[in-house]
Amino acid sequence: DHGRNQDGLRLFCIGLQKNTTLTDLCLRNNGIGDEGAQHIGEALKSNTVLTTLNLRDNKIGPEGAKSIGDALKISKALTTLMCALGSPPSQVQMCSLSCHCLLCSGHALPILELKGVSPVETIELQGKGLTHLSGIVIATCISDNLVLKSLNLGGHPIRDEGKIGAEGAMHIAEALKINKALTDLNLQENAI
């Protein structure tokens, strides 16, 4: 039953908020949707030890991606997030960096750089198969970045998949209302 699963996940996440020992958590293929991702996001904001989270093969949509993105802005512990945000699971590979990362179509998003924690002035993500869900996470991360001046999110001119689309672009536009540093943004070939 869908409601019971969400209740179970909500209760699990309450425990995860206070857990001080669990470093690796696999929640793969649990039917987690946006509501579940919101619970997970809340848990990540206060959990100080979880370093690896596998959310592959779930049903996380735009609202869930935003919740996870919001949590990434706050989380100091999470270093590896495995999550097929809008891409086929076969294209997702594990990213194991010494920084926050989020997988989109097999490419890692440089979360620390997008957040401005590891400051860079330019980020090149053109042709990386970004989706509307990765656009939402990127928007959440860049809103408070005071260093990033150039962000290339251009799509692939030949392939139809891997586009940020109107929904991702809308979230990026909202982030631009807050961001005071970005002067160059490339969104070409993104079906917006």
Image (cartoon, rainbow, N blue to C red):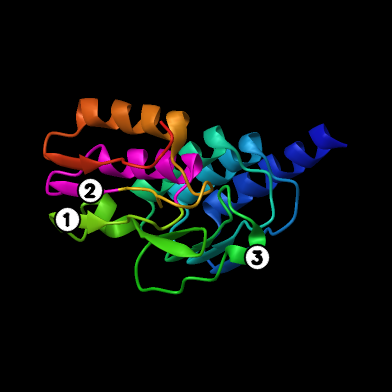
- Disc 1 designates what residue? 122
Which residue, given by chain and number where applicable, does mark 3 sit on? 90
Q: Single out the residue that lies furthest toward the front.
A: 158
Name the residue rendered at 49%, 42% in the picture: 133
Q: Residues within 10 Å of mark 1 (few under 14, many from 20)?
A: some
| Residue at far right of view | 1
> Any magenta on residue 68?
no
* Residue 49 seen in this snapshot: no
Could you tell me residue 138's position as x and y percent? 36, 45
Which mark sits nearer the N-terminus, 2 or 3?
A: 3
Range of residues picked out in magenta: 130-152
Image vertical order of residue 35 relative to residue 11, above or below: above
Nearer the N terminus, badge 1 or badge 3?
A: 3
Q: Quadrant of residue 101?
A: bottom left
Label pair 2/1, CB-CB below 8 angstroms: yes
Q: Nearer the viewer, residue 51 or 122?
A: 122
Indicate the position of residue 103 as horizontal and vertical percent values: 48, 60
Residue 1 horizontal/vertical position (percent): 88, 37
Mark sitting on residue 151 = 2
Coordinates of residue 29 in the picture (x, y in percent): 74, 56
